[in-house]
Image: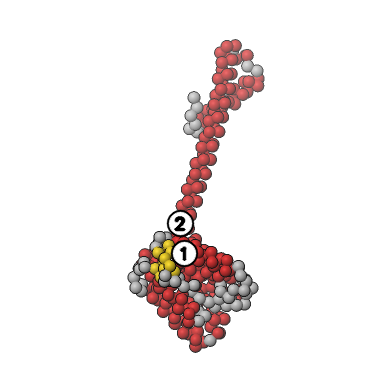
Amino acid sequence: MNFGYSRYSGGSFPPMVRNLVIINIAVFLLQQIAGRALTFYFGLIPQAFWHGYLWQVFTYQFLHGNFMHIFFNMFVLWMFGRTLEMMWGPRKFLIYYLICGVGAGLLNAAVMPNSPIPTVGASGAVYGLLLAFGLLFPNQMIFLYFLFPIKARYFVIIIAAIEFFSGLNPNSPVAHFAHLGGMIFGLIYLQWPKWRRKASHLQGERERKQHLKVVYNRRDEIEALQKEVDELLDKINRSGLDSLSSGEKGRLKEASRKLKEWEEQGWPVN
């Protein structure tokens, strides 16, 4: 899919984007010399990955299948990555890029655990960059096929839907779930602080409501005991202590004990 371009520019070639492009091109040239052996050893083969070739989930993203494959990925890396790096800085950008790439590989290996076919390419990481751009610059216009303007947030939703439904086709030669994996892990990475704060807020609200429930219940208990004590004391005032039965004396003693205990704990007891 030709994503076109965005008019939002974050600098021509920031250092981490430049380094990633150089590394990918260098590895691609090495592939042309080494042949398929490099792909089968460092590409992501789910069957091999689950049998101990754990490095493949990292190394696969620096290999590519052909010239158009690497050209497309490097073009999108440059087009969107420069803006993100200029905003985040090289270190955070690299961390995010690698998390998306590794996450893409993990999801691909999980969806097709027995596949003997190698997956290569930076597409998972690149789709993570698209996701980040759409979240951070939702109203920025992207020119699809260099002609059709569309807001970044809608663009991300559309390509995510395309990848999901395309991934349902078992005969597709493209690792669509790797693309989705890059977007999913990118979303988790970017939104995790917000989700954690929201979860903390919800937990605080639940605890507050639980506390209020305890307060209201204890208040009802206090009122009920005070009413019972008042009624028993009124009876004593009218007819004397001997007018109370042994059961009423026991309830008066127990109610008075509880009220005193709650008062010592700070509950308002009249």
Task: Kindly identify the residue that appears in the image at 36 percent across and 74 percent down.
Answer: 13
Above/below status of 2 relative to 239? below
Residue 103 in sight: no
> Mark 1 highlights which residue?
155
Residue at 39% x, 68% y: name it.
6
Q: Which residue is mark 2?
A: 193
Name the mark on residue 197. none
Q: Label 1: how many residues lie within 10 Å, few (<14), some (14-19) or many (20+)? A: many
| Residue under the image location 60 percent in, 11 percent down | 239
Dot 2 amino acid type: Pro
Image position of 270 with respect to 143: above or below = above
Is disc 1 in contact with disc 2, using a CB cutoff of under 8 Å? no
- Numbered disc 2: secondary structure: helix
Residue 144 image point, x, y percent: 44, 69
Badge 1 or badge 2: first in the primary sequence: 1
Residue 137: x %, y % from top left: 40, 61
For the point 36% across and 68% down, the residue is 7
Coloration mode: secondary structure
Viewer-side residue, 270 vs 27:
27
Gap in Å between the C-alphas at discs 1 and 2? 24 Å
Q: Amino acid at mark 1?
A: Phe
Give the farthest residue toward the right.
Answer: 246
The mark tally for this picture is 2
User: Which secondary structure lies at badge 1?
Assistant: helix
State whether residue 243 appears in this view: yes
In the rendered image, residue 64, in percent from the top left (x then y), is placed at 50, 79
